[in-house]
């Protein structure tokens, strides 16, 4: 945005307001030129996001879904999108039956992408009456752990007591691995368990 009087690009935003209609989002700015003091208005309008077909490949399977994008934007190969299956990288774009590397979104038929979700890495402590066995685990991001779960980990069978997440300490409910910082557990004298995390151990840290 340049000043219409003197052409300066030293512009101060005095005020802005957003209006939303059925098809468009309009941002109206009240601007002041810092060089000549001229006050003027400018309007930027964007088409409202709408759903586009998205096919995500993930190892040996693929997911068909949609993603809401603004038709006014541009999309290119290599862009990262946040889909309902997590972060994906655009691998190909289909525009009227041909594949292109770059397109204005309103012209796109289908977006192909591959999942770039990395596993969640969490800490897992086993309290051995004073000593602690500590592990780093790589889990699927939506893997759920609940206080009270009986878990096999290495040579231990343990009960989960507390789950520390990014926000709080949980002693009930459950948490998904992508928000878990560390799980605290104590050995129990059971032979059965809810699940085995041994194969998820990335390394033993103590
Ligand atoms: Zn000016």
Image (cartoon, rainbow, N blue to C red):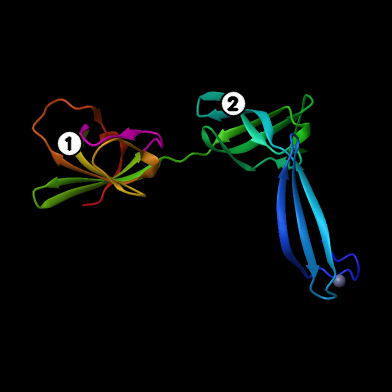
**Residue 27, label in figure:** none
Q: Nearer the viewer, residue 198 or 37?
A: 37
**For the residues marked 1 and 2, what is the alpha-carbon distance in whole angstroms?**
38 Å
Residue at disc 1, secondary structure? strand
The magenta stretch is 139-150
Task: Reply yes or no: does residue 147 show up in magenta.
Answer: yes
Please state, as top left, top right, bottom left or bottom right, where the N terminus lies in the image.
bottom right
Ligand 1, seen in the image, is in the quarter at: bottom right
Disc 1, ligand 1: is the CB inside 8 Å? no
Which residue is under mark 2?
65
Disc 2, ligand 1: is the CB inside 8 Å? no
Q: Earlier in the sequence, mark 1 or mark 2?
A: 2
Residue extending furthest right? 5
Residue for point 41% across, 37% down = 141
Q: Nearer the viewer, residue 13 or 176?
A: 13
Residue at disc 2, secondary structure? strand
Which residue is under mark 1?
159
On screen, residue 154 versus residue 29, left or right, reads left
On screen, residue 184 versus residue 103, left or right, reads left
On screen, residue 166 versus residue 19, left or right, reads left
Residue 163 locus on image (x, y percent): 27, 43
């Amino acid at each position: 945005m340049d000043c219409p009087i003197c052409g300066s690009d030293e512009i101060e935003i005095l005020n802005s307001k957003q209006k939303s209609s059925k098809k468009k989002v309009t941002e109206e700015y009240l601007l002041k030129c810092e060089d000549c003091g001229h006050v003027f208005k400018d309007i930027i309008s964007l088409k409202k996001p709408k759903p586009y077909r998205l096919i995500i490949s993930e190892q040996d399977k693929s997911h068909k879904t949609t993603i809401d994008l603004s038709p006014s934007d541009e999309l290119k190969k290599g862009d990262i999108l946040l889909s309902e299956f997590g972060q994906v990288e655009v691998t190909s774009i289909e525009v009227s039956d041909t594949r292109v590397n770059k397109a204005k979104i309103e012209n796109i038929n289908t977006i192909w992408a591959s999942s770039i979700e990395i596993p969640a890495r969490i800490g897992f402590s086993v309290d051995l009456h004073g000593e602690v066995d500590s592990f780093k685990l790589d889990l699927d991001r939506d893997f759920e752990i609940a206080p009270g779960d009986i878990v096999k980990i290495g040579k231990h069978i343990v009960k989960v007591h507390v789950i520390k997440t990014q926000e709080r300490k949980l002693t009930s409910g459950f948490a998904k691995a992508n928000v878990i910082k560390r799980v605290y557990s104590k050995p129990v004298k059971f032979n059965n368990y809810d699940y085995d995390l041994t194969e998820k151990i990335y390394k033993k840290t103590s």
